[in-house]
Amino acid sequence: MKRLALSLSLLCLAGCGIESAGTAATAASLKAKEVQQAQETKEQVVRQLDEIQKQADQRLREAEGK
């Protein structure tokens, strides 16, 4: 009887470990998506800043030419 109880306890603990591993994998996957989205946002902001800089440079050249 003690062996059965011990075996059931070990199976329950093993199940918790598997669930924890699954949760960790899900969290890691979500974090990876978050990092990718942040990188995409950064690239978009850099492109926008480059465009703004080009416009400012063009306006400066036009102002100097007048």
Image (tube, helix red, strand yellow):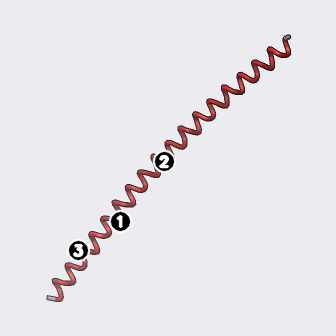
Quarter of the image holding residue 13?
bottom left
Q: Is 48 in front, or is 29?
A: 48
What amino acid does circle 3 point to?
Answer: Leu
Q: Earlier in the sequence, mark 2 or mark 3?
A: 3
Residue that appears at 80% across and 14% down: 62
Q: Is 62 in front, or is 16?
A: 62
For this orientation, the residue located farthest to the left is 1
Secondary structure under badge 1? Answer: helix
For this orientation, the residue located farthest to the top is 66
Determine which residue is flagged by label 1. Answer: 20
The N terminus, quarter of image: bottom left
Location of residue 27 in the rendering, given as x and y in whole percent from the top left corner: 42, 56
Q: Earlier in the sequence, mark 2 or mark 1?
A: 1
Location of residue 28 in the rendering, given as x and y in whole percent from the top left corner: 43, 55
Quarter of the image holding residue 57?
top right
Residue that appears at 71% across and 23% down: 54
Q: Specify whether 55 is left or right of 3.
A: right
Determine which residue is flagged by label 2. Answer: 34
What amino acid does circle 2 point to?
Answer: Glu
Residue that appears at 35% across and 65% down: 20
Location of residue 22 in the rendering, given as x and y in whole percent from the top left corner: 33, 60
Q: CA distance from mark 2 to mark 3?
A: 35 Å
- Eyeballing the image, is 6 above or below 11? below
- Eyeballing the image, is 8 above or below 40? below
Q: Specify whether 57 is left or right of 32.
A: right
The C terminus, quarter of image: top right
Q: Earlier in the sequence, mark 3 or mark 1?
A: 3
Q: Specify whether 8 is left or right of 57.
A: left
Q: CA distance from mark 2 to mark 1?
A: 21 Å
Q: Residues within 10 Å of mark 3 (few under 14, many from 20)?
A: few
Determine which residue is flagged by label 3. Answer: 11
